[in-house]
Image (cartoon, helix red, strand yellow):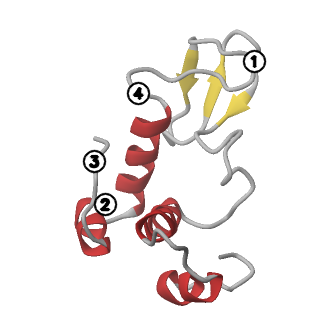
Amino acid sequence: MTANFGSLLDLMDAIPDEAAAVAHFRAIRWPGRAFCPYCGGRRVCDFSDKRTHKCMDCRQKLSIKVRTVSENSKVPFRKWLMAIWLITFFKEGIASTQIAKDIKVTQKTA
């Protein structure tokens, strides 16, 4: 499911909602099969919400956000993907004020 997006519009078309964004993050973070970022175990069970998991080796609860830059963030995955695309698209950088404006978050969040 990972792909290169030529424009922000391509990204938004390919990932139209939060569920698609979570699935895209999951495909990037855990290609093939989930693993525990705490112990590296492969015996990971899914909870019914499909966003929370539990490692059967170390018994830790986890999500795809654990040990990533978005770990303690309440910003939706779709906005994270848009911000990442903007940062990587502009080779000479992009101002945090512009990212904040483009994805509709505060400058501090951006």
Q: Give me the C-alpha separation between circle 3 and circle 2.
A: 11 Å
Name the quadrant containing residue 27: top left
Foreground label between 3 and 2: 3
Numbered disc 4: secondary structure: loop
Q: Earlier in the sequence, mark 4 or mark 3?
A: 3
Question: On the picture, is 14 further left or further right than 22?
Answer: left
Tag 2: residue type? Ile
Tag 3: residue type? Ala
Residue that badge 2 annotates:
15
Foreground label between 1 and 2: 2
**Residue pictured at 32% horizontal, 72% vertical:** 8
Residue that badge 1 annotates:
59
Name the quadrant containing residue 19: bottom left
- Relative to residue 100, is residue 3 depicted above or below? above
Q: Give me the C-alpha separation between circle 4 and circle 1.
A: 22 Å
Foreground label between 4 and 1: 4
Q: Residue 98: where, in percent of width, then height?
A: 55, 88
Residue that badge 4 annotates:
31
Question: On the picture, is 85 further left or further right than 93?
Answer: left
Q: Residues within 10 Å of mark 4 (few under 14, many from 20)?
A: few
Question: On the picture, is 39 further left or further right than 80?
Answer: right
